[in-house]
Image (cartoon, rainbow, N blue to C red):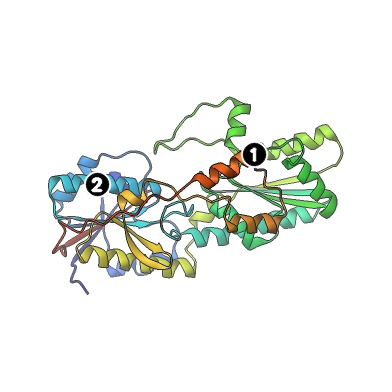
Amino acid sequence: MYGVTRILGIDGGYRGFYAKNTIPLTPKVVNDIHKRGGTIIGTSRGGHDTFKIVDSIQDREINQVYIIGGDGTQKGAAAIYQEIRRRGLKVAVAGIPKTIDNDISVIDKSFGFDTAVEEAQRAINAAHVEAESTENGIGVVKLMGRYSGFIAMYATLASRDVDCCLIPESPFFLEGSGGLYEYLERRLKENGHFVLVIAEGAGQDLLADELHTMNEKDASGNKLLQDVGLWISHKIKDHFAKTQRLHITLKYIDPTYMIRAIPSNASDNVYCTLLAQSAVHGAMAGYTGFTVGPVNGRHAYIPFNRITETQNKVVITDRMWARLLSSTNQPSFLTPKDVLEAKKEEEPPTQLLDGENCKDSKDAVAATTST
């Protein structure tokens, strides 16, 4: 359509720019990649040298850069865009949202989320079968969700087999009236089994207090999380061993990387095509410094500085979380203070796109992906 003759895939994420690694992305090369899991151009974690990346873009005479990834990747794309703008280069920079966590703000959802939720249900179903097959059986499933509990919430709603879902946005406590232990014992007496879904970022404050952990971070600057799935499994076992009111059998399932390593489902395949086409049309129209994505059902171009200033999180005063509480019959575990703080959060105002400095960009295109 646009007469582009050369498309390069940057191998290994951001650092691939200055490692001189490229993969020619011809129609033959990319013909069936939607049927595979992962990415053919690799990913990377950790920091990168923005100046070296832009130097590489200049040296290769690239005039469109498509950057695929989650919240951290979009922040990196924003830095690259700013450096390109500072140098006065005629290079369009477009972001494509890709994260199973669904934590990119503004857009309705991110690519990979539907597939992850679908696969997460398999783990929940396995936990339910195991729990139901023994007296006082408990199945615990830990799902991805460092700061946002969308996978856990939607997988729980889709499954209808879950008795309790714990996410980072909603604090919880174990002991006392209204606590998890009390609810767990009651459900076991009622149903004879119990399924608990917990996001990896839930309860980290409880772990930090108990284990006296430091605020260590990984190469990408994210806080290193303790294994809340193992922790809560041990806490539940210890509780029943001490009280001796019920004899339980607990099975712990951790499908963390299974849910993101599989090929995308039909819904995500179609969605990814729409994202890619929107990004190309935007760059060819002369826009730069944007991420594509649906907003209230319409595909839009969102400025980097708007999409990177906050993270998308489950709103615990929203109807969707209320639907989950109704589905599981779990207590909310929330204090009036928690609810008040949740209501105070407001969306920042929308900002305008920058459409200058990227006209006539039809020669070379680069794509990179990062995690």
Indicate the position of residue 338 as horizontal and vertical percent values: 59, 41
Quadrant containing the N terminus is bottom left
* SS category of the residue bearing label 2: helix
Quadrant of residue 4 within the rendered picture: bottom left
Task: Give whichever of 8, 200 is nearer the camera.
Answer: 200
Q: Could you say where residue 287 lies in the image, as x and y percent from the top left? A: 22, 60
- In the picture of the structure, the residue carrying the numbered disc 1 is 230
The secondary structure type at the circle numbered 1 is helix
Which label's residue is closer to the chain start, 1 or 2? 2
User: What residue sits 17% from the left and 48% below the top?
Assistant: 85
Q: Name the residue under label 2.
A: 80
Mark 1 and mark 2: Cα distance apart in space? 39 Å
Residue 279 x/y as whole percent: 30, 63
Q: Which mark is residue 200?
A: none
Kindly give the residue lying farthest to the bottom in the view shown.
Answer: 1
Q: Is residue 126 visible?
A: no
Say how many tags the image has.
2
Q: Which mark lies nearer to you, 1 or 2?
A: 2
Residue depicted at x 59% and y 58%: 319
Coordinates of residue 111 in the picture (x, y in percent): 43, 60
Left/right of residue 314 with respect to residue 4 in the rendered view: right
Left or right position of 177 against 314 = right
Q: Which residue is drawn at 59% across and 53% down?
A: 152
Look at label 1 and name its amino acid: Leu
**Badge 2 amino acid:** Ile
Residue 115 horizontal side relative to residue 43, left or right: right
Callout 1–callout 2 Cβ contact below 8 Å: no
